[in-house]
Image (spheres, rainbow, N blue to C red):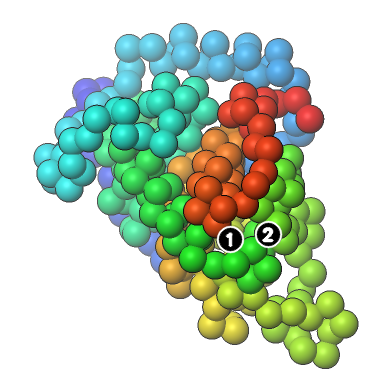
Amino acid sequence: MTKKESIDKVEIVEEKLKGEELEKAAEAESLETEKKPEKSIEEKKKELLERVKKLSGKVDITKSEELKEKVKIKKRADMLIPLEEYVKSGIYLGTKVVTPKMKQYVYRRRADGLAIFNTDLIDEKLKEGIDYLSKFNPEDIILVCKRQSGWKVANMFSHLTGIRVFTKKYPAGILTNTTLPDFFENELTIVTDSWLDKNALNDTLNVHKKVLMICDTNNFPKGTSNIIIGNNKSGKSLGIIFYLLAKGYCKARKITADIPDLEWWTSEED
């Protein structure tokens, strides 16, 4: 199969995935990562090496002149962190399902159909996310992260910034039901994955508050005020995101905090 035939095949699949079918496929990709048992570091390394060997030389690179025009050429020194750190974390790896609104951030497909984010746009959206987040006081923000791989970094982000976090479970109705003893009002909800954190997302939208969402290619950013793009399945990728958010927020709000080095945030050890 030629590269063009491979691309055409992916596009045909996308065309078939409309409406409810697209939503089911997109949600399945987020839920699948939570159902799989946690693998050991050695198993992950072995799997990664086998995947690299298998896909070596089969990467399908497609050029997008429109995307090149949209993204201004910038010096690597202007990035929040070196490009190599983005690459090592896998933040640029999307999923096979790409929702309509996320298509603009994807610049190519691999031979296996996996969508790849543009790293310049990842950096750009992170900067925008930090600026937007910094407009709110810590007590007016909540972070919701049901994905287990993000619990460690989400809790550290909360500790450093003073922003309230909900990880394992989001208590239903605490933003909408005034009769609950733990009811409170917030102004902004940070959503890690719209599929796993849909209850918090829906509650926030129901009370007409703001949403800052981390969006993978399989997410629908409908109703959000601002988005950060990138892989929201991987612990390393979420580590990069929450590290930069914590660092940027503390700096903007003049919060004194002893922020761990980037290596801590991307480490798989607790």
Residue found 84% across the figure and 77% down from its top: 182
Q: Which of the labelled discs sits on residue 163, or is there none? A: 2
Residue extending farthest bottom:
179
Q: Tag 1: residue type? A: Ile
Q: Nearer the viewer, residue 149 or 11?
A: 149
Q: Nearer the viewer, residue 11 or 176?
A: 176
Give the quadrant of the N terminus.
top left
Q: Earlier in the sequence, mark 2 or mark 1?
A: 2
Give coordinates of residue 76: x percent, y percent.
30, 28
Badge 2 crowding class, 10 Å Cα cut-off, few under 14, some 14 to 19, many 20 or more, is: some
Is the Cβ of the residue at disc 2 closer than 8 Å to that at disc 1? yes
Q: Is residue 95 visible?
A: no
Residue wearing tag 1: 190
> What is the secondary structure assignment of the residue under circle 1?
strand
Give the quadrant of the C terminus.
top right
How many numbered marks are there? 2
Q: CA distance from mark 2 to mark 1?
A: 10 Å
Residue found 32% across the figure and 12% down from its top: 57
Residue found 55% across the figure and 57% down from its top: 253
Q: Tag 2: residue type? A: Ile
Q: Nearer the viewer, residue 50 or 193?
A: 193
Q: Would residue 6 be found to the left or right of residue 270 on screen?
A: left
Give coordinates of residue 243: x percent, y percent.
58, 39
Give coordinates of residue 93: x percent, y percent.
45, 34
On screen, residue 146 above or below 50: below
On screen, residue 265 above or below 126: above
Badge 1 crowding class, 10 Å Cα cut-off, few under 14, some 14 to 19, many 20 or more, is: many
Residue found 74% across the figure and 49% down from its top: 159
On screen, residue 91 above or below 209: above
> What is the secondary structure assignment of the residue under circle 2?
loop
